[in-house]
Image: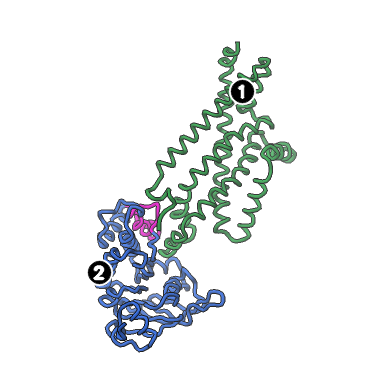
Chain colours: A blue, B green
Amino acid sequence: MLLQVENIHKRYGTAEVLKGVSLNVVAGQSKVIMGPSGTGKSTLLRCINHLTPPDQGRVLVEGVEITSANLNKMREKLAFVFQDFNLFTHLRAVDNVAVGPRKIRGMNKVAARDLAMRELERVGMVERAEAYPAELSGGQQQRVSIARALAMEPKVILFDEPTSALDPELTGEVVAVMKQLASDGMTMLVVSHEIGFARQAADEIIFMDGGHILEQGPPEQLFASPQHERTRQFLSRIGEGGAGA
Amino acid sequence: MIVEILITQMPYLLHGVWVALQLLVCLLALGFVLGLSLAILEVYGHWTLRWFGVLFERIFRGIPAIVLLLLFYYGVADFVDISAFTAAVLALGLRSAAYQSQIFRGSILSISQGQMLAARAMGMSKPMAIREIILPQALRLSIGPWTNEFSSEMKATSLAYVIGVVELTRQARYIISSTQGNILAVFAVVAALYFIFNWLGNWGLYRLERKLAVPGFEQGGQG
């Protein structure tokens, strides 16, 4: 098991956002977490790499609890792609991708740059390697941020609503990159309502509601015959699912 | 003839400028290193360090520069042997650190939180994230406000005159007393010298700001 998440609880003041969430991801799998907003999906992702430390529960990567050793070292294995990209504003696209390998993994300048160019190629952004983030469209920024994640050669990439800050016509290019990664065998845990990606690239859909996992299963099963009324309602709201809207 | 006096005395005035510039560079350097450290402590430090930073900044921003100069020279001279120049660097430099800390603190706080999150998420330690990601952005944003501090401190070097540092203003006083009068002419030249060096300094900083500018960043970044 590559990623094990066990019984995560998180509370903000009196509101319990996560009420004991557990899930596993096998190497090479991609799983998509869906559910109504305010359900704790993003909080769960942030608890997994301890950007937000959970109040309770454990996260294991390749069987090693991530707080048991050097947290920074463990985070290298869990890349994170943000909703609003968070590219480093003062660095060109290529340096955004190279900065991790160079500063964190200790590669030399030339090797880090070569690696960065290869990862930019993978997301189709080589031509804009010398551009600053402000000179790129949202979709291009998100592709560079995926290249930045790949350059750390992580075990898993966590995607936190990677397309929801994008104009509809720009989501396609990001989804295409993500599908390619999934078919290349990258292990991915994706919070997203991108039906196209979920249908074609996900091995499993996890439906969350009210801080719990309500149900999970392969996309064809979950979309065709959801077990819970909440799931049915949600799927029909986003224009998908067995209940039909 | 006043013109003759000014010409023969010019080397003294220029030496005064030289001393003033040395004082300026030393006090700004001290203020930069200490001010930046204070700003980092105030934003990221443990609350005790933060508290110390705030206390330091309140004290040095709350006391007139002349009083600080007198305190550091006459006050400290009772305990340790300290030159007027060193006392001036300390008094004005610590005061500048207090002001500069506020410039840097403001710039650091204006960097979007996502920058730190992204750096930590990829496995950077906090100090590395501050060094590699936050400061390169915050320092760029600081250059503009920092030109203010540069101008104030350039002019504040003239205050060191009260504790006997032989900088530009004191050289002017010497010339006036040794040549009986000519106050207006001598101080007009002195004023022009301050003005020119201030102008040059600001021009250089403006050039630096333009040189380091990153597209889209000078407007405060975008989402």
Picture coordinates of residue B145, whole percent (x, y):
52, 44
Relative to B6, does residue B59 appear above or below in the rendering? below
Q: Which residue reaches farthest front? A: A245
**Mark closer to the observer (2, 1):** 1
Per the rendering, the mark at residue B187 is 1
Highlighted range, magenta:
A87-109
For the N terminus of chain B, the quadrant is top right
Query: For the C terminus of chain B, which image quadrant?
Result: bottom left
- Look at the image and tell me whether residue A65 can be seen: no
Identify the residue at horizontal 27%, vertical 78% (top origin): A199
Residue A203 painted magenta = no
Q: Is residue A169 visible?
A: yes
Find disc 2 in the rendering and name its residue: A180
Label 2, label 1: how far apart the Cα atoms are? 74 Å
In the image, residue A2 sits, relative to residue A225, either above or below, namely: above
Residue B209 appears in which quarter of the rendering? top left
In what element is the residue under mark 2? Answer: helix
> Looking at this view, is B167 or A83 the one in front?
A83
Given the current orientation, which residue lies at the most extreme right position? B78
Residue type of the residue flagged with mark 1:
Phe
Chain designation of label 2:
A
Res A209 → quadrant: bottom left
Q: Secondary structure at mark 1?
A: helix
Amino acid type at image mark 2: Gln
Q: Chain of mark 1?
A: B
**Mark 1 surroundings within 10 Å by alpha-carbon count, few (fewer than 14), some (14 through 19), many (20 or more):** some
Residue at horizontal 34%, vertical 61%?
Answer: A145
